[in-house]
Image: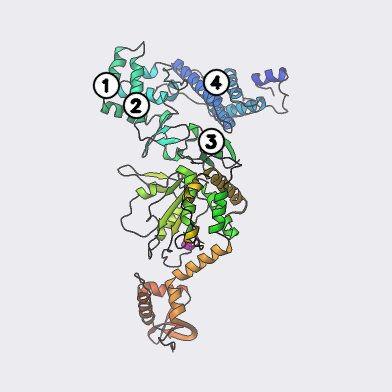
Amino acid sequence: MSLHPFAQRLVDAGVLEAPADPPRMPAVSLPAAPPGSDSAIRYARAALAKECEAVATSAPGTRNHTLNKAAYSIGQLVAGGYLEETTAFDALAAAARTAGLGEGETIKTTSSGMSAGSRSPRVVALHPMQEMSPAYTLSGDSLAQPSSDDLDNIHRGQARLAYRLAAGYAGRLLHVPGIGWHCWDGTRWRADDSGAPTRAVLDVVRRALSEPTADKELVSDVRKCESASGIAGVLAIAGALEPVSASVSDLDADPYLLNTANGTVDLRTKTLREHTPGDRLTKVCRAAYHTDATAPRWEAFLARVLPDPEVRGFVQRLAGVALLGRVAEQILPIFTGTGANGKSVFISALSYALGDYASTAEPDLFMARQGAHPTGEMDLMGRRWVSVSESDKGRRLAEATMKRLTGGDTIRARRMRQDFVEFTPSHTAVLVTNHLPQVSGDDQAVWRRLRVVPFDVVIPAEERDPHLAEALQLEADGILAWAIQGYIEWEQRGLDEPHSVRAATDRYQTDSNDVARFIDERCFVSPQAYGTPGEFHIAYSEWARADGEAQQMSLKAFGAALAERGYRTSKSNGRRLVRGIGLLAAEGTTLV
């Protein structure tokens, strides 16, 4: 079994040892060149140049993946007969060395990728509309000229400039249907709010008019685009072209990438690398990531408001799992307690450090209401830490909404006057409230999601620091490091709720169950006890009104709730009776 010629030259030069089972490209039977193959070959060469540029400029941590992907694509073109194998191999290998990959890894990855690609030969469609992206090449930040005349010969008017815009602004502009245009600001893809795409069209216009070879047709095409409608037309076409077009699912797609002020953290390896537009990240933390960053004021604050170290560990792991861009824990933590207990300060400090990844959702997001608009859920897209503040007493939890938004299912929402989009949720939500919302029924799918975290310590007025929030903002880097440490601990042990959180949640469930409380307060249990369903329901309704319950169960729902607790209705002498339970009289005697 022979080595690839390039690999063999390295072995002959003593750079590498010949492997026992050296990688090689399989023998490929090349098809006959199709008619008019010159255009296809030009396309293939442009594609090779583009892939080599992508490999040479790939960031550490992505180099091997980028090389493998490029080698696979070029292997398809080699197998299709459009590129010479050795030339393609040498070009990719040179690009990999420029990126900093070692010789052994370069040969192995290039050979493997090209070999895999060769098993799916590619046929290049000769119509330029079908193979459009490689017809332009990039050179730095400047708008490059077409590498062939195909597109300029075929397209006129707005389409002609749209292709030039897409080629010249690849990596700087991005269009997402349903959301709009985004601009690369050096750290993330930011939703455009300053007219950058319009300025880009005008730049393309100026460059086209300044070309020494600009003919009358080009000048005519350009002049037709120098109006508001012309610019809008160019952008509408360009937004559908591959170099500057992306789908919603392309954005923030890797849940393990956390963008920070000084680079992108890969949560899989806990390493930091440079920002790159290829990651398609739209969010960035306000804090920078430094492994040695500390937050002494933050630690002291937590010890004061959450004196139980187990609870502090729990909220740290909760903050940690929130850094992960997917729903890993199907829960809704509820931070509760009267005022001046630190829960709002906690939310504000962590949200400040997380920057774009944090969001304060509308207060009614998880509350039962009429006429909810889907724009509220649109704010969840791409977020990781979402807080919902609700202080009104007596609000009822929108249980179906809560289950849907914490369950990881695809969310369908839209902005005002825009189309609906679908996205995979990435957020961990937390409800911050002075009053626990009302929950109806015993739906275990609801209760298995709820986690009550009591903030029971009330800070005396003389101890309250009006400048604490500002002081914690100065420790944003340390707070981010604290949260990442929480993620590491979550990987090792999960959330691991402490006893106090479980106990508070159990109390909440017991207190929320109207029927259970009614039985506990107004009934007694005995094998000899019985009563009619109507008698029990009348007593329940009176009890519920006295308890301030605005919503009461119907007779049918109440009977079903009793049956769930083992008190079923049966017929006796023509009467329907509930057996095993009886009503207490007002003075404490029993009614049987």
**Mark 2 residue type:** Arg
**Mark 4 residue type:** Leu
Find disc 1 in the rendering and name its residue. Answer: 224
Identify the mark nearer the N-term, 2 or 3. Answer: 2
Extreme top residue here? 212
Identify the mark nearer the N-term, 4 or 3. Answer: 4
Identify the mark nearer the N-term, 3 or 1. Answer: 1
Q: Which picture quadrant has residue 159?
A: top left
76 versus 348 height, above or below: above
Q: Is residue 450 magenta?
A: yes
Extreme front residue here? 462
259 versus 547 height, above or below: above
- Counting from the top left corner in percent of width and height, residue 447 is at 48, 63
Find disc 4 in the rendering and name its residue. Answer: 30
| Residue depicted at x 33% and y 42% | 419
| Residue depicted at x 41% and y 65% | 438
The answer to which of 406 and 153 lies nearer the viewer is 406
Q: Is residue 287 left or right of residue 227?
A: right
The residue segment tinted magenta is 435-451
Q: Mark 4 vs mark 1: give the one in front.
A: 1
Structural distance between the alpha carbons of marks 2 and 4: 46 Å
- Counting from the top left corner in percent of width and height, residue 408 is at 47, 51
